[in-house]
Image (cartoon, rainbow, N blue to C red):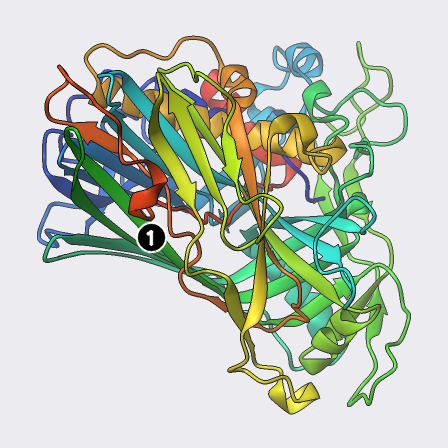
Amino acid sequence: MIGISVITLLFLLTFTTSVQATEFGGHTFSEEYFAIEVDLAVPDPSNPDLIKDLINPGAATGDTDEFEDHQFYMAYMNDSGIETAFSALEKMEHDITFGELLDDAVYDILHPYYPGPLDTTIFHVNATAPFQQLVQHFKTPEDQDVFVTNNFMALIAYSSDPNDRIMDSEDKLYLGYTFSIQELVDAVNGVLEDNMHDYRIGHFDYSSSFEKVGDVYKFGIRYENMFVLWQEIGVAPTGVDIFGAGSQYIQDDTRGIIYGRDIVAASVLDYISFDYEFKTQEMIGANKYVLGTVTTHYNIGETNFLVINENTLPTADWNHTPFVAAPSYTFDVPDDLAGFSTGLPAPLPSAVTVTLNEMAFYLDDDAKARMRMANGFGLTVATATTTFGISLAEDPSVNNQLENETSRTIDLVTGGNTFFFTEFTNKNTYKLKGLFDLWGIDPNADRPVYIIPFTPSDTWVITNVAREYFAVEFAYAYGFTKFLAYELSDTFSMAGTADVYVSSILYFTFTEFSEWYGGEIYHDPAYSAVAALAVDDTSDTGTPPGNGFGAIPGFELISTFLALPPLYAIYRKRRR
């Protein structure tokens, strides 16, 4: 019963109610830098629980409710007027009640009679997702207050062959939801045990890091045992009413969102690791400029677990064949509510069971062999870039678009000045490891990376389920950026809703690894670049250095907010 929920509305609520904070997690944004882990699931999100201070381990820490967590890692740096803030989800943990599953009208009918049963916990959720966002705040050469944001949008698998390595509309495309729900993992491990297999999916884990070495800031986060659910991008986002055909119990706004029956495959990544380096550099032109560079390094672990909704045996030498199972999940309706019908279209059942289609389970090397069939799959990391506080004089300019997919530069220009650019340098190859014993794939061989930029008008991949999924993700991105806008600027404000953020996307970049097969991807560095400029003397801006001076900040942000539909409850809990 896995799908996209509106959990990110909680993030929007959290950060927009935090904008009055002058201190956050024991720190202020007047500091040169700080790095903290905080829990936002508290009565006053502007005063979160400080779980850990990565710079001052002796700082007071505490968790007022260890079973209700919304835990984030935040790193902040201010160097030469370029403020960089990084946020990453560490985990979220919540009790889900029966009342939080229901449509508002149904809830209102039942609440006068059964307020207690409606608050009965149905199940507990302990989950993580490597959602990350990088926000930079600086002044343009024309002294304009601007925020530039980069955030992960999707992990996409696409069918590839030796003659066509680049992802295009002719390929089969699968959107990947990178999310690990421990209760779901435990249920899958139960299926594995029932079929007498020794393989077990490990518990998810995470670890954050921060250090300042000389004039370079280094920070990052690593996630282990990450679940990925795959769905064809082209399918319509239709769902199923978990209470039975035609009933009106479930939340109206969760209808039409992705449910488990639409998932075509699931896999587990051993780890996803992100490491960042931020530094500034003075550049001398007609005036003095400061470039703030964030270089991104990331590695993606191998896959030893694959579940797919068909039972075709791969043509390979097998230690054992996959087994077939139809996973299901049942939760009980509180006794006092079972059979209740007054004012409802049908009586409430005593229990609800959701059964997925039969799935074939491939383990260990069998998982990689199955992924290598049909010429294999490429893996794409999609990110989105947008700005606030400035109007572009022209659309983003993409250089070298038809020449070399690994040497592209994207400029943002206003008033004749390039105030921000993304440059892909020294990232034209990656290595694929862990497959030598299977097929003799050389772990030291360099394989080409393809960089494909898109503007929203021509992103044919942003359709159907991907479009709805991205809209949900942007709710958090908008909330976090709005929070920072209040904290970092005396003059800048963000009005409107998250829809403003969605409509403000300037460009997507797709980083494509054409060969995958479930091996470990080593790509170091991932991006080399987003460029920001700050000026000391605004009386004569001159001509900014532009992209001829090299790379600047980059972001590869893998993650996702995929959740059980009942996680919608987290937002409802705050709203009520």
Residue under the image location 61 percent in, 64 percent down: 268
User: Which amino acid lies under the numbered mark 1 shown in the image of this protein?
Assistant: Thr
Position of 275 relative to 530 (above/below): below
x, y percent for residue 311: 90, 68
Q: Is residue 117 visible?
A: no
> Quick one: label 1, few (<14), some, or many (20+) residues within 10 Å?
many
Residue under the image location 67 percent in, 63 percent down: 188
Q: Is residue 323 visible?
A: yes
Name the foreground residue: 271 vs 526. Answer: 526
Residue under the image location 23 percent in, 15 percent down: 20
Quadrant hosting residue 258: top right
x, y percent for residue 61: 17, 46
Name the foreground residue: 122 vs 321. Answer: 321
Position of 6 relative to 445 (above/below): above
Name the foreground residue: 299 vs 548. Answer: 548
Q: In the image, 70: left or right of 121?
A: left
Question: Which quadrant, please, contains the N terminus?
Answer: top right
The secondary element bearing badge 1 is classed as strand
Name the foreground residue: 504 vs 416. Answer: 416
x, y percent for residue 56: 10, 51
x, y percent for residue 132: 42, 43
Position of 264 relative to 472 (above/below): below
Q: In the image, 282: left or right of 90?
A: left
* Residue matched to label 1: 295
Q: In the image, 103: left or right of 136?
A: right
Q: In the image, 333: left or right of 472?
A: right
